[in-house]
């Protein structure tokens, strides 16, 4: 047997150091202004309504994508078309308004009164769903073209052949 008297005593566990203070959490963002909240609600709700409409009448949903959602509440939907809009006449027909009313009522789970404003000055310059989608499409195409131009094989081909890109097209969705 070994004499353990010459060995140092076993190390005692040290108490855990006090936990470091938690980093200060970022200040919560102030609630958006009521106008901003209502604009976001209107846009999201209107897109939801159009998605419902597209399942039964896709051509009408396409028309209404060009409308300005002027007021969207669970009881009333007011959409407007700019003066001289070529699709306003079709979108304001009784059958079209009835289909939009049904989609809005289904979306909110209660009867919704729908108003279509023709030649609406309030709609002029409004950011419609169609305009938003066009911007998103353009941005996707620009990113895809930039990515393709940087692809290693494209870069290698340009270097080897001493070429430059004259035109680049991206396949449609």
Image (cartoon, rainbow, N blue to C red):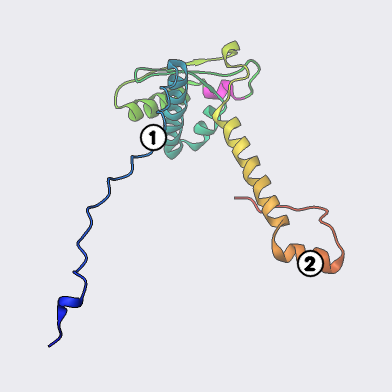
Q: Position of residue 83 (x, y in %)?
A: 63, 15
Q: Residue at x 53, y 24 (%)?
A: 91
Question: Does residue 4 appear left or right of residue 166 in this picture?
Answer: left
Q: Secondary structure at mark 1?
A: loop
Q: Position of residue 169 (x, y in %)?
A: 72, 52
For the N terminus, the image quarter is bottom left
Looking at the rendering, which quadrant does residue 123 occupy? top right
Instruction: Answer whether residue 95 is magenta in the image.
Output: no
Q: List the residue tagged with mark 1.
A: 24
The answer to whether 105 is drawn above or below residue 120 in the figure is: below
Who is closer to the viewer here, 61 or 171?
A: 171
Question: Does residue 91 appear left or right of residue 140 in this picture?
Answer: left
Who is closer to the viewer here, 100 or 94?
A: 100
Mark pair 2, 1: CA separation: 52 Å
Q: Position of residue 149 (x, y in %)?
A: 73, 56
Residue range (magenta):
87-91
Q: Residue at x 46, y 25 (%)?
A: 40
Q: List the residue tagged with mark 2.
A: 157
Q: How many marks?
A: 2
Neighbor class of circle 2 (other Cα within 10 Å; few <14, some 14-19, many 20+) is: few
């Amino acid at each position: 047997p070994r004499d353990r008297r010459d060995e140092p005593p076993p190390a005692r566990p040290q108490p855990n150091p006090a936990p470091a203070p938690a980093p200060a959490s970022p200040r919560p963002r102030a609630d958006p202004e009521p106008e901003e909240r209502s604009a976001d609600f209107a846009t999201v709700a209107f897109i939801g309504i159009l998605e419902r409409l597209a399942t039964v009448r896709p051509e009408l949903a396409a028309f209404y994508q060009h409308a300005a959602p002027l007021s969207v509440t669970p009881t009333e939907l007011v959409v407007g078309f700019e003066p001289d809009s070529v699709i306003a006449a079709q979108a304001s027909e009784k059958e079209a308004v009835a289909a939009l009313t049904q989609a809005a009522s289904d979306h909110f789970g209660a009867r919704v009164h729908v108003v279509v404003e023709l030649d609406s000055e309030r709609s002029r310059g409004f950011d419609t769903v169609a305009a938003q989608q066009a911007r998103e499409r353009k941005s996707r195409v620009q990113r895809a073209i930039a990515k393709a131009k940087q692809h290693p094989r494209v870069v290698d081909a340009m270097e080897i052949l001493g070429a430059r890109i004259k035109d680049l097209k991206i396949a449609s969705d």
